[in-house]
Image (cartoon, rainbow, N blue to C red):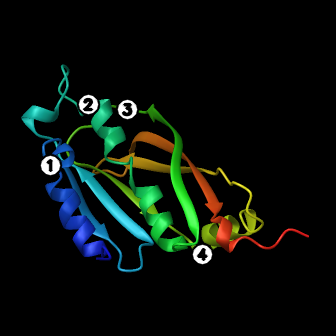
C-alpha cells in the first residue's frame, strides 16, 4: 500500500510521541512539496519555566524534510537524516509552527549533485515561529542523498 499525504498526516497526528507532545501536522501537500506542523501549548508539555520544551520544538521538525524530499525525489534516491542542530532564539509560548517547502530549485540542485552516484549531504533549514511570526528556534538538518546504484550512469 502506497502511503498518501493525507494518510501520513492522519497517522502522524495519532502517533503517540506527537499526540502527547501537542504536535499537530496541519498540512501535507498532495505533491509532497509542503508541510506545516504546529506545537500547541498544553499544561503537560511546558517546561519548568512555563514555555515549550526544547525537545518538543526539535521533535516537531524532525522527520519532515527527509519525508518530503524522499517522496518528491521518488524511488530512485536514498534519502536519510544525517545530522541536526537547533538554535533556541527566544522562549516559545502559545502555538508555534514550522513550514517546510520543497522548491523546484532545491530538487534541481539535488538531482544535479547526485547525478553520478556521489552522496550529497546538504544542510536545510526551517524556522519555528510563534503567532506573531517571530522566530522561536532555528533548526538545521543535514540529509544524506544518493542515487541508487541501479539508477547510476555506467562507469566509463
Name the residue that disc number 1 marks.
Answer: 19
The label on residue 90 is 3
Dot 3 falls on a residue whose secondary structure is loop
Separation of residues labelled 1 and 3 (CA atoms): 24 Å
User: Are the residues tagged 1 and 3 within 8 Å (C-beta)?
Assistant: no
Separation of residues labelled 2 and 3 (CA atoms): 12 Å
Q: Earlier in the sequence, mark 2 or mark 3?
A: 2
Separation of residues labelled 4 and 2 (CA atoms): 34 Å
Q: Position of residue 101 (x, y in %)?
A: 47, 65
For the N terminus, the quadrant is: bottom left
Dot 2 falls on a residue whose secondary structure is loop
Query: In the shown orientation, is residue 96 left or right of residue 62?
Result: left
Separation of residues labelled 4 and 1 (CA atoms): 32 Å
Name the residue that disc number 4 marks.
Answer: 104
The label on residue 53 is 2
The label on residue 125 is none
- Quarter of the image for residue 114 reads bottom right
Q: Position of residue 154 (x, y in %)?
A: 81, 73
Between marks 1 and 3 in the image, the one whose residue lies nearer the viewer = 1
Residue drawn at point x = 20 percent, y = 25 percent: 47
Q: Earlier in the sequence, mark 4 or mark 1?
A: 1
For the C terminus, the quadrant is: bottom right
- Quarter of the image for residue 71 reads bottom left
Between marks 2 and 3 in the image, the one whose residue lies nearer the viewer = 2
Compared to 137, does 61 lie above or below?
A: below
Residue drawn at point x = 23 percent, y = 72 percent: 7
Separation of residues labelled 2 and 1 (CA atoms): 15 Å
Q: Earlier in the sequence, mark 4 or mark 2?
A: 2
User: Are the residues tagged 4 and 1 within 8 Å (C-beta)?
Assistant: no
Amino acid at each position: 500500500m502506497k502511503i498518501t499525504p493525507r494518510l501520513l498526516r492522519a497517522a502522524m497526528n495519532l502517533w503517540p510521541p506527537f499526540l502527547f507532545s501537542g504536535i499537530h501536522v496541519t498540512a501535507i501537500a498532495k505533491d509532497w512539496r509542503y508541510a506545516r506542523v504546529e506545537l500547541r501549548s498544553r499544561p503537560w508539555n511546558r517546561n519548568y519555566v512555563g514555555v515549550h520544551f526544547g525537545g518538543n520544538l526539535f521533535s516537531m521538525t524532525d522527520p519532515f524534510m527527509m519525508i518530503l524530499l524522499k517522496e518528491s525525489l521518488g524511488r530512485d534516491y536514498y534519502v536519510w537524516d544525517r545530522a541536526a542542530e537547533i538554535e533556541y532564539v527566544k522562549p516559545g509560548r502559545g502555538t508555534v509552527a514550522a513550514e517546510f517547502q520543497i522548491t523546484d530549485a532545491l530538487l534541481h540542485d539535488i538531482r544535479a549533485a547526485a547525478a553520478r552516484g556521489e552522496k550529497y549531504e546538504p544542510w536545510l533549514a526551517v524556522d519555528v515561529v510563534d503567532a506573531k511570526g517571530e522566530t522561536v528556534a532555528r533548526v538545521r538538518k543535514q540529509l544524506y542523498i544518493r542515487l541508487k546504484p541501479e539508477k547510476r550512469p555506467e562507469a566509463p
